[in-house]
Amino acid sequence: MLNMNNISRIYQSDTIQTHALRDFSLNVKAGEFVAVTGPSGSGKSTFLNVAGLLDNFDRGQYELDGVSVQGLKDDELSRLRNEKIGFIFQNYNLIPDYSIFDNVDMPLRYRGFSASERKRRVEEALEKVGLVSRLKYLPSQLSGGQQQRVAIARALAGEPKILLADEPTGNLDSLMARQVMEILHDLNKGGATIIMVTHDPDQAREVNRNVQVIDGQLADFKIYAPLEKPVDSSGKTISAAVNEEMADA
Amino acid sequence: MNFTTLNIKGLIKSLLLRKFTTGLLILQLAITLGLLVNSAILAFDTREKMSQPTGLDDENILIVSTHPTSGSYRDLDYYRSIVNEDLAKLNQLPGVNSVSITNQLPIRGRGMLSNTHDIDNPEQEKTDKYLQDVKYTLADENLAEAMGFTIVEGRFLNESDELDFDSEAKNNIVITESLKKGLYGDESAVGRETNNGIIVGVIKDIMLDPTLPRDKQYGLFMNTMMKYIFIGRFYVLNVEPGQMANVRNQVTDTILAVQAERDIFDIFTMSEHLKSFYRDDQGLSDLFLLLCGLMLFVTAISSYAYSQFHISRQKKFIGIRRALGARKKDILLYVLTENWLVYSIGCLLGVFVAIGFNILLSQHISLSKPDMMLFVLATAVIFISGTVATWFPAYHTSNISPVIATRTV
Amino acid sequence: MRSNSMFTYNLSLAMQSFKRAPSLYFLVVLTLSIGVGLLCANLALVNSMASDPIPEKSEELFHVSMNTWPNDDPQAEPFHILRYREAMKIVASDIPKNSAVFYASGVYARDSASLSLKRFDSSVRATTPGFFALTNAPFAYGSGFIKSSGMEVVIGHELNQKIFSGENSVGKVLELDGELLTIVGVLKPWNLRPLFYHATEGRAFNLTDDIYAPLETSIDLGWSIHARSSSTVSYKGVKFTRDRDVFYLQAWVELENSAQKQAFQYYLDNYSQSLKEVGEHPLAIRNELRDVNAWLLEQNIVDQKVLAFTLASVLFLCVCVFNASSLLLSRFHSAKFEVGLRRAIGASNKHILVQGITESALLGVIAGLLSLLLSWLFLKLSTKFLPDLENLAVLEPKLLLLGVLLALVTAVFSALYPLYRANRYTISAELK
């Protein structure tokens, strides 16, 4: 699915050359849930930017879903981002002036879907994160966890090949973080490929594979056994948990 | 262009969130449109006025305005002899078809006027007030040829129409066609008598006073120029096409060679005379155009600042859009559409400003009502100048890197 | 002096701010000064046109209109020009302190003692002697003539410059259209804007005359009428007008109080009544006295084109203010971090406001100075496009002041909303 080979990314300032990534190689297979960890400044953000086609790289090969990305034009990169990648950011990155519906709708417009197709997909995606009742709300009217779930819906709506999550729970309290993680695991169960940058070792342990980045290189590999379905003893489903939270809001 | 990538409703919402700046820009655009439309009206009005047919051989008529400076001219016989010599000498210039003299020119407001009515029907002046101010032109027999009058009925003045200077007999007169209609309707006028003399001919209308209606160009001509030579201020020369510059250069020397104690105020063609009549209209219209230029400039600065300011606040969101798959041209279109939306609202509002301004202006000057074409034209100008002004910030914006989306500050 | 040092501190902050975004401030100053300059230039024109040319006694000088038209056809309204007989009736009255009856003419003038035959085209005011006292004509040399006849003239400053290069020419003899007249007085430079004594026929902004000649002499010499005349009969020149129905003389009287005015009105009406009694006044009696400002207002001398353009320049100034306001808004917005910082270290809202107003006032002063230059430029430009305005294009000190004030006010006004917004940025939001 994602195949990086000896990628280097060098930032050049007047006096210093910084190797943000140095001969970085990583292969992620379809259906995998990979956690990327590492100290700050290690290059994990750069990795995510390169993986998400937000930033270019200086050396190496990168193949995403069978498409070799080096040498692609800006428009083609945009198209790939739009069609193959779903982004989940630490600070959600919702457009504050837009309603929940319009936020999820936005990338679909760039895809050129018809209005009815967009509507169907937006509602379906919001259904998956349990927020379909809040189409007309503004992001500021939602809690942080809800906002992040909107962001997940936005990432899902385009039916991407791969989800890239950048500290998706970094701004959330533990209860909300838990809900978001549950959604991600659920999606992974449904077959989604996920790469998540995180500094939370517990989260890193819950996934299929944890890779560690230090000084721009892949330092460590840990492969964990796939987890059981995250259902608590009472047998509550995710959406039930969501409803509970709504009652609080 | 693919407008489905845009969320128009979202755009409007985002404009509403910047009510103040958007409102200011919309007001500016509306005022600019109002001024553009009315300036265009002034420009077109002036052009139309200047291109009205005068009924004269405009390009080939040369006029010399002159006056003696010496006291010797108070002897009118001396005055006449000099004028006759002037006329003869001017006539001999190569390229001159004919030469005449008159007390006043067409295409002038007011001037020497006289009330005119059929001798048996003085009441006419009460039903048609234009008959109270009929342009009263003193001429000699050559004026028709020099000016290029067209005879409609009868004949123009001839030498026999010039009476002895102390004669009390009635003068023969020639009148314009509209005066004939005003006095006698469709009947023939030749042989009829007015308070100013007996009509011997009717000429096709010429533009005597542009401030009067086209069908009220009332004028009469009589062969008394030599009698009242002291008001004979204008020599009228009809010049062979192509010879104008040549003749023009020789006129002053020719006249001064006859007698030097003369002031030659001005030498001009009839078309220059027409232009100078509308000089102030032209000047005002030019001033308005100048103001339009300034206003477009200022509004362009505002459009630029508006999008620049907006973009500086939207950088992050533009980055997010890029990260989520917007192409550069999508962003370009997004920024431009936002501006176009503002221009559209501004121009729509501008229609009212234009109409209001038009009403306000028409209390001071005469100008036509705005029409649809002018609105379209002015709107196009605003869109083009606005787009040019926002192109740079918009283009700059489209180059915002999507990486910005993952930054947390 | 705490407030004083605060002021200098604010000024220095403003200067720093200008340095930080020079092109933005340049645009603000430029647009404001163009807007103010243009409006000021137009106001200067309107001011020249609408001003009182003789404020010291404009309420005591009255123009006389009468409706003595001898038949009932065209002239139903009182007429601003009079026959010789009415004019003489006015001159004969001893009610007014001064009276002047005149018509406009023109002659060619040269120094009779000069060898050169060059003659100068000169405008003539053929008038009764009361003219000089009535109009407060300023004499440089000599004085006015005392009688309405006699071969004497008074000349204006400019003609004296042209013919005698400005020296005292009293006693010299001019040749005017072949006749010899002696100079008895020379005027100082005399600007009357508007030229109230002859505001009709579009002459309200002509210069004062070159030559002032006795009325009877001018008529006898046959100096033709260079302004509107109207008659019911034909006549062979001005010489033959005294006993005919030729209307061409304008009359002004100086009446010092309402009693005099009433008495003079009565005098005129009485005269009209006497005409009516012998069947020479077919119209209803309507004699009108209007003081200088009422007369000028009635003549509608303010150029409508200039008024129209002034309207447009008011709109333009609005656009300039809006533009400055949105520019300042974006400037203050980008400086909000700094504002937050200042607030955090203890500057009160008021400090920030005073700082902002100091900055905009400084902008206003700069724009004001620039606008003076631009007003002058626009005036030159206006007279190029509308040459008739040439005698009017004068920037008086009060207009210069108005320009600077206008710039100051518009600059502060432009900054008001942006400042209000800047003051609402919360400290925490900017400094988290």
Image: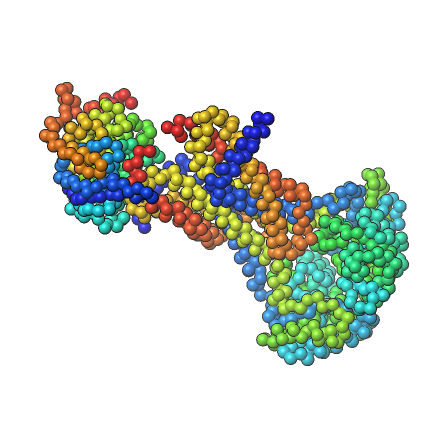
Question: Residue drawn 54% across and 56% down?
Answer: B43
Nearest the eye: A95 or A59: A59
Query: Quadrant where the N terminus of chain A lies?
Result: top left
Question: Residue drawn 78% across and 42% down?
Answer: C56
The image position of residue B297, as x and y in percent, is 49, 49
Query: Quadrant where the C terminus of chain A lies?
Result: top left
Question: Residue drawn 24% across and 29% down?
Answer: A169
The image position of residue B337, as x and y in percent, is 37, 45
Question: Residue drawn 26% across and 21% down?
Answer: A247
The image position of residue C257, as x and y in percent, is 82, 39
The image position of residue C355, as x and y in percent, is 52, 32
- Can you tell which quarter of the image residue A88 is in? top left
Q: Is residue A196 above or below residue C369?
A: above
Q: Is residue B194 above or below residue C417?
A: below
Q: Is residue C214 visible?
A: no
Does C351 sit left or right of B257 as displayed?
Answer: left
Does B89 sit left or right of C267 as displayed?
Answer: left
Extreme residue in the left direction: A225
- Can you tell which quarter of the image residue A85 is in? top left
Nearest the eye: B319 or C46: B319
